[in-house]
Image (cartoon, helix red, strand yellow):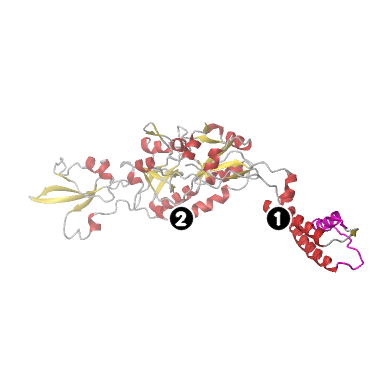
Amino acid sequence: MSVHKSQENPQGLSDTTEVVSHAVVQRSRYLVLFEQHVVNISKVFYMFTSYPFSPEGHRATLGSWSNKTITSVVDLFPDRYPDLQGAVLYLASWCDDFPIIYVSGDGCIGSSLDTLSLIAHKLNFTYEVQRETQDQHWGALENGNWTGMLGDLKYNGKDLALNWFLLNHNRWKAFDALYPYYAEGFGFLARLPEPAPRWKNLTYSFTTNLWLIIVCSTMVVSCMFSALMPRHMTEGTVDHIQQIILVCAGVVRQVVDLGGDGRWAWQRVWLGWWWLGCIILTTAYTCNLIAFLTVPVYTTRIETVAHLAASDLRVIMQDYGSFLPEALKESSDPHLYTLGHKLDLYPYEEAYDPAIYGVLNRTHALTETYSYLMNLQIQYNVTQDTYLMKEQVRCTRVTCPGSCPRTPRTQPRCPPSSPDSGKRGLLTSSFSYTLPACLRPSRTPRSPRCRP
């Protein structure tokens, strides 16, 4: 980008600081400005560029134009961000975003801060962490104005937000998001259904169809045995009760006496095969019964958004300024629309106690980012009593670890030439390293949050 300005000041150089520092000009990654001067009757073009973090500021001289000094594009357009010259970046952060950034002792730690520290060492800058936002909001567009950390970026002179943000259309339009490295949606935490009555465990070893087959087979075999192979006959009559008992004895694994006179030997063979099958069947039943008696059987869980919308459960969420409530209410999907109108918000100051109380009383399902719901299960010791629904609500396809205001004044503070910020492996490794330590079991009811 080049600008020509011929007006001169008393020092013989044009006052171009205002032009170079203009918002539109500063959005250029490469910048050179030419000024025409008269030196010994000859016209000379002086070249200037802008190093926002250098002591030279927005008027750094590159010398005069010459075919000998300018031999390549790199000579004409030097990198404006070789490093950040010891600059201080002010973070629009909230140390309540586990495992990205959260409170530990008197300060804040987290995977994003670990990554930012490595980048700061490479690019020669430092940063100051903001512990929480003034308005206690995460960051959303409300009545045309941004709140929370995004409001700090837009209006309060902050340079970088590195908390977890779902990249919806409004955020993408107003801010420059850095490299996404992890995708996640909103999950739902619900109470496990009450176990079925214990006596029903006696029937769970086999399916309904198999029980019907066993009953029908027993009746058929009893009738055939009674009709074809009478064991005791008195004056032409058959003792049907005795024949049915012989067949049913195999089902319940009871010993019966077939008599010792040697008559009807093939009767013994038939009953032998029948009883062998019964032994196999009852052995399988006993093994399955042990499993069902050991592990409680629950009724069907709610696993999808459609089932949740059709159930009597309401949805509960902490009110920290997320865009999700409005997005659900305006959704074109009928199930999400229903959830949006049965969503209850409660104040941020009450932590997650009201939400967990509603979940345990089977009146609500808690919605939050999926990984943080796992954290809440451990922090509140409800892992054995609750479960995470399989289906998630994904309002976007990417989750970003940081963003900068899409305003030229601070755009240089997120230099596009920063190589470390694009290392997905570095970001992912830092995230994975931090996560296990935060998910250790604890009885502390208050913990950092992952945020949309």
Range covered by the magenta-colored residues: 237-264
Compared across the picture, whether 30 is left or right of 389 comes to left
* Residue 246 in magenta stretch: yes
**Mark 2 crowd level (few <14, some 14–19, many ≥20, 10 Å Cα):** some
Foreground pick, 100 / 360: 360
Residue 213's mark? 1
Q: Which numbered disc, 2 or 1, marks the residue that appears first in the sequence?
A: 1
Compared across the picture, whether 221 is left or right of 182 comes to right
Residue drawn at (75%, 57%), measured in percent from left and top?
220
Residue drawn at (42%, 52%), measured in percent from left and top?
119
Q: Secondary structure at mark 1?
A: helix
Rendered position, 237 above or below 175 = below
Foreground pick, 199 / 165: 199
Q: Please identify the residue farthest to the right as the structure is shown.
A: 261
Residue drawn at (44%, 55%), measured in percent from left and top?
424
Residue 315's mark? none
Residue 285 at x, y percent in the picture: 74, 56
Inspect the image, locate mark 2, and give the three-letter code of the amino acid beneath it: Leu
Place residue 68 in its image quadrant.
bottom left
Q: Which residue is mark 2?
A: 426
Question: Real-space Cα distance between discs 2 and 1?
Answer: 60 Å
Question: In the rendered image, is residue 104 in sight?
Answer: no
Compared across the picture, whether 429 is left or right of 36 comes to right
Residue 239 at x, y percent in the picture: 87, 56
Mark nearer the viewer, 2 or 1: 1
Inspect the image, locate mark 1, and give the three-letter code of the amino acid beneath it: Ile
Question: In the rendered image, is residue 355 in sight?
Answer: yes
**Mark 1 crowd level (few <14, some 14–19, many ≥20, 10 Å Cα):** few
